[in-house]
Amino acid sequence: MEKQTSLGMNRTGIDMSPIDSKNMIEEAEKTLPSSTGDETAIYSVQNSYISAAAPVGSVPIPGTLKGMATSAMEKLSGDRPEVLIDSLGARLAFERTGTRLYDYLISKCETIGVEGGVSLDTLKRFREEEARHFKTVAKALTSLGADPTAQTPCADTSAVASSGLLQVLSDPRTSVSQCLEATLIAELTDNAGWQLLIQLANGMGLDEMVADFRAALAEEDIHLQHMRQWHEQAILNQTRVKAA
Amino acid sequence: MTLNLFDAKGCALDQQRFTWKELVQQPISKLDDDAFTRVRIILMNGLELEALRFQHACARMNKDLQRPLAKVRRIEQHQATMINWLISADHSTLETTIGYEQVAIEVTAAVAQNEPDAYLAQVYRFGLLEDFDHLYRYSALLDRLEGKDANNILQCYTDILPGRPTVDEHREPADDLRDHYDRSKAAPITKLHALTIMAGEQQTHNFYMNVGPLYADPVARQLYAEIASIEEQHVTQYESIIDPNETWLEKWLLHEAAEVYNYYGCLEQETNPRIKAIWERFLDYELGHLHLVRELFKKHERRDPAEVLPETLPDPIPFRSQREFVRRVLKQEVDLRTDGTQFVDKAQESPESLEYRRHINSEGSPSQAVAAGYQWSPGTELNRKIA
C-alpha cells in the first residue's frame, strides 16, 4: 500500500472544530487552575526522588577481579575498567538491536519498495556489518574477562532511549522515509558511541581493540552517510525540491 | 431499527470463531479517526473485560454453569482482544489514558441524563466530576512530561478544566458505597447503565494499575497511583448500586444484555465502516450468547427471562459531546461530597473521609503538583507562554 505523505482527514488540530475550539479555549482561559505555581512543581517532587534514587544497576564484576586475570585487563589497573565495560556493554546491545532495526527496514523496503535511492543490497550489507560489530564488541569484552551476555547499566538505558525507534520500524503503517529517519537517529548515536569507545580504548592502551574499533567506525561512517542521504532524498523526492 | 431481544437468536456459538489474523487487524488511526471511534473501542473493551471477570467469578461459584461459561468466555476473550488491539501503537500510554478519561466523561454524562432513577443519576453526576478532573490532571502531565496537547486526542469534544479536585476525592471506603437499585422495580435501562459504567470504571482501574509502573517519572508514577486509587473507589461505588440480590444467572443474563445494548449503540453510531462491521459481527455474537443464557435461565431457574429483560432495547447511549451538561453539573455540584451513601455539601462531609484524606495527602499531592498553575491552551502551554 502507498505510504507517501498525503492530505486527508486529520482531526487532531483545533482548526477541525472552529466553533467547539473557540468555546473550549474561552472556558479554559476564564477557569483558574486549582493550585498555584507552574511546571516546576513537578521538578521539586522529582528532585526528592533523584536525591534518594539508587542507580539502575551495576556493571558485573569481570572474571579478572574474581581471579581470572587476562592480559588486557592487567593493563587497566587504576583505570576504572568498569567504565569501559559499561560502554562496551552499551555498544554491544546497540549493535545487536541495530541488526534487528535493519531487519525491519529491509523487510519494509522489500514489501513496499525502496525510496530515496535506497539500495537493498547495501542495506543487507549494513545489516551484516552491524551483526559483525556486535561480535567485535563481544570479543573485546571477553578479552577483558567480562561477560558479553550481561546487560550493563548503559546498555539498559540506551535500549530504553532507542525503544521508540523499534516502535517506528516495526509498525506496518510507517513509510520507508519514516523508517529511514528512525534508522538515522540510531546511526547518529552509534557513530558517536564508536568514537567514544576508540578514545577510551586508546587512552587505556588497548591497541588491538582500537584497531578493531577503527575498522568498525569506518563502516559506521558509511552507514551514517547513506542514511542521512537516503532520508533526505526520500523526503525531497516527494517534492520538486532538489538536493543541495 | 428496534431489536427484539426475545426473537433474535444471533450467531450460533459454534460459528463464533476467530483466527489470529482476524484478532489482530489494522488499528484505527490516532490522527484521522474520530475520537468517538476510540471512545467506543475503549468502552466495548471494558464491557468484554467485565464479561470475563464476571464469568470467572460465576464459574467459581456454580459448578453446573462451568461448561457453558467456559464456552462463552473463550469467545468474550477473543472479542476483547480484537477490540483492544484496534488501539494503534503510536498512542503513548498517556495518550491512551486521555482516551480512557474521555470515555468516562462522555459516556457517564450521557448515562446521567438518561437515567430515570434520580438517586442513581446523582451517583453518575458525582463520579463524572471526578473523572472530569482526572482528564485535567493527565492533560497537564501529557503537556509537561511529553510536550503534547491532550486535545489532539479529545478533538475538541471534551473540555480540559479542573473538576472536583482529585486531591479531595479520597474518601473513607464506607463513603464510597451507595444504595442499590431494587431488581424487582428498576427499569431495564437502569440495570444496563449500571453495568456499563461499572465495566468502564473497572477496566480503567485495571489499566492504570498495569501502566502506572511503566513511567520513569516519579510524579507520573504518583499520579497514576493516586488516580488508580480513585478508580478503585469508583468501582466500589458503581458495583454497590447493582442489586446484590440478583441471582448469578440473572446477572449473567443482564451482562449479555448490556453487551447487546452497547454493541447495538456502537453499530448505530459508528463512522468508520471497518469498525462498524466489527460492531455488527459482535452484536450478532452477543445475541447468540444472550439466547444461550436465556435458555439456561429457563432451565435452571424455571423463570421467564422476560422477568428480567425488556422485549426491546432502550435507546442507545448517545456518543456525542456532552460539554454543556458537564459544565452545568460542574457549576452546580463541584462541592458535593458524601457521608455514607448520601450526597452532602462539603461542609457536611464525613469526618472519617476528612481524616483519611488528611493522612494520604500529608506528604504532598501528585494531582496538585502536576497541574500547578495549569491552564490548557491549544498546542500546549508552551504555545501560550513562549511569545
Image (cartoon, coloured by chain):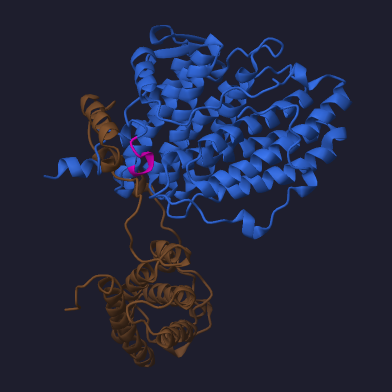
Chain colours: A brown, B blue
Tell me which corner region of the image, top left, top right, bottom left or bottom right, holds residue B149.
Answer: top left
- Return the residue found at the far left: B387
Whether residue A47 is visible: no
Quadrant of the image containing the C terminus of chain A: bottom left
Question: Where does the image place residue B385, in percent across and percent down from the top left?
Answer: 16, 41
> In the drawing, does residue A226 fall left or right of residue A156?
left
| Residue B120 screen position, x and y as percent | 55, 14
Query: Toward the viewer: A52 or B356?
Result: B356
Q: In the image, is residue B107 part of the stretch drawn in magenta? A: no
- x then y, percent, for residue A39: 25, 40
| Closer-to-camera residue (B318/B168) | B318
At a point 38% along the width and 89% down the height, the residue shown is: A209
In the rendered structure, the answer to whether residue A170 lies left or right of residue B139 reads right
When asked about the image quadrant of residue B55, the answer is top right
Q: Quadrant of residue A15?
A: top left
- Residue B155 counted in the magenta span: yes
Q: Residue at x 20, y 44 (%)?
A: B382
> What residue lies at 73% left-to-right and 38% top-to-bottom?
B10
Q: Which residues are magenta?
A: B152-156
Secondary structure of the magenta portion, mostly?
helix
With respect to residue A62, does B133 lie above or below?
above
Residue farthest toward the front in the current orientation of the protein? B1
Against B88, is B221 above or below?
above
Position of residue B59 relative to residue B213, above or below, is: above
Give me the residue at 46% from left, 18% from top.
B126
Classify A86 as above or below B25.
below
As rendered, which of B244 and B2 lies closer to the eye?
Answer: B2
**Is residue B339 rendered to the left or right of residue B66?**
left
Q: Is residue B229 visible?
A: yes
State the count of labels. 0
